Amino acid sequence: MAETKTYREALREAMVHELDRDENVVLMGEDIGVYGGTHLITDGLYDEYGPRRIMDVPISENGFTGAAVGMAMMGMRPIVEMMTWNFSFLAADQIIQNAAKVRYFSGGQVEVPLVIRGPNGGGVQLSAQHTHSLESFYGHFPGLKVVAPVTPNDVKGMMLTAIRDPNPVIFLEAGALYGTKGEIEDGDNAVPFGKARIAREGSDVTLIAYGRQVNLCLRAADTLAEDGFEAEVIDLRSLRPFDEDTIVESVEKTHRAVAVQEQWRWFGVASEVAAIIQDRAFDSLDAPVERVSGAEVPGPYARNLELMAFPSEKQVTNAARRVLYEEEK
Amino acid sequence: MSADNEHSEDGGVETREDGGAIATSSERLVDLYRQMALIRAFEEACQRGFRQGKIGGYLHVYIGQEAVATGFLQAFKEGDRVITAYRDHAHALLLGSDPNEVMAELYGRKTGLVKGKGGSMHLFDVERGLMGGYGIVGGHIPLGVGIAYAMRYQETDHITQLYLGDGAISQGAFHEAANLAGLWGKEGQCPCLFIVENNKYGMGTSVERTTAMTDLAAKFDAYGIENEKVDGMDVEAVVEVAERIAEQVRETGQPYAVEALTYRTAPHGAADFFEKYRTKEEIEEWRERDPLAMVEYKLIENDALDEDKLGEIKGEARERIQEAVKFADESEEPPEEELYTDVYSGKDEYMGEE
């Protein structure tokens, strides 16, 4: 059975599933309890589970994230909400210096079953300090797992996997999509990390993205189809671990690839995708890999400027046309 | 300016008269002395090992501060946890970690306490309660508060001893974590004993030059955490406070802070050669209150031990440490495949070329 639910409901459903299954699971965050959560992800949970399981914390990301690491080292399984990932810079010392590394520098004596989740990326005119896509920032550090699902079914399934994982998981949500709907499998639909999803099959060009940009690529694929080009769209879902094989297999079929990301171009995921393709599928390529990225500016406020700062459907279709050696439109 | 009132300018601790109110049995005093002598011998061997190039990285020794951890860990009970910063050798030894393994860790050997992956700053012995030494000043304090919270969440009567230095008091992590501890403590959910090891200097910058309000115990008032000070050079005084306060924390689930006024008579780290920030006279004055020397004096005064017997204890400690040095020196380096283990728990998801 599958039911149509929102991204927001998918998140809540997974957390409720694990709250009920495992007494060690607790939720922590700013205004997640009595207030119901800034994005209403945790709405109603405080009344149901009480303050022991649903913990409101003061505005102190460094402090409460570090405390969650300590709890996890003791066998609890905290799920920390970053009201937005933009605030996680304040907790970066705890996430990077402690959560990611303590297993290694303790010689494997401890583990950190911790999930840190919240909305990532921009798109709703929040301007410079509230517009970041942090996947390459966190994806850089060994010891962390980093996932960025986009469909409600994956959101639920990957959250289940994240909570059960014995390692710290950076769960990057597409905040702009909390209200979008999709079919969700009932019950325990845990989706493994490290496996990309073919969001659309095609034979002429491969579009590779994750998070919100997957939807952009699907729209671009429809447009390209009008001109007779069938694009395959790969939703990476999981960035660390990373599924190289699905990309390589697709490029061996299409011989052309465009990597799309909302974040800035330099040192980004798309660059990593391009490097993997030239490493493993160089002989299959009929054109250089194209990258479509955000503009190299802090997030602007005005709607028109903000739209210019993020990848557009036109940029994606034109990049695809370039690798197909077709005229840009 | 005498060594003992230097801290007390800020309304600090009263130093006890010799033979003061605390009547520790001679037997116990000898036992405490033995523990401190082992730490001293270990740290001196570390300094030699560093000069010989056997120990790499940073090296922070505990010489001068032995009474603090020795005293507080007398109140340790099985199931309790200890977390500290990078001056962590003493804490491991006192919790019963094998000196061979501790030294082997510093030597970067596979027999080391954490398999040669952490070194001097990252000693862990989770089985014995040591939840680690941490290298970022103040960064471990939130962890300690979370560990204490988990103890009550899991319905145990264990407590966390959380050690931090005076330098960490200026870090945001300290203030955020202390605020959480106070908050959770209101509900009896944070059995955390904060032990501020105030050795007067964060590296080479004195407490007076880092904060306008130099009463570090009183910083905890802002977070609703009870606090007091203790003469951290006097192991008997530390034991008295530790046993009393640990019991209270265990009973109430509420945090408590003790500022131990102490002094590092050794340099900050192995690269701290010139000590421009303090005078030889100051160091000499504090050496007169050396925690081991104070106990020696008392034991002799009480006719409990004579010089020969004291020499014997020190000799035994040195011998034990020589054995540790030999063990470390003769141990193998970690095997190459160890590079890629312990990055993740569970299925190896290392991403890269092995």
Image (tube, coloured by chain):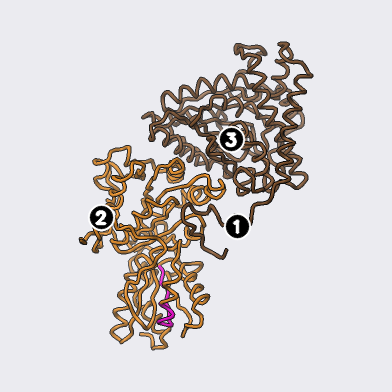
Chain colours: A orange, B brown
Mark number for residue B250?
none
The residue segment tinted magenta is: A250-261
Q: Which chain's residue wears label 3?
A: B
Is A215 above or below relative to A72?
A: below
The residue nearer to you, when weighing B106 against B68, is B106
Dot 1 amino acid type: Glu
The residue nearer to you, when weighing B277 against B321, is B321
Q: In this view, does A199 lie to the left or right of B236?
A: left
Q: Is residue A208 left or right of residue A98?
A: left
Residue for point 53% across, 43% down: B139
Q: Mark 2 points at which residue?
A: A187
Q: Mark 3 points at which residue?
A: B165
Q: Which chain's residue wears label 1?
A: B
Q: Which chain's residue wears label 2?
A: A
* Residue count near mark 1 (Cα–Cα under 10 Å), binned few <14, some 14–19, many ≥20: few
Q: Name the residue under label 1.
A: B337
The N terminus of chain A: image quadrant: bottom left
Question: Where in the figure is residue B192, as x and y percent of width and height?
Answer: 47, 31
Residue for point 59% across, 27% down: B260
* Residue count near mark 2 (Cα–Cα under 10 Å), binned few <14, some 14–19, many ≥20: few
Is A60 above or below relative to B159?
A: below
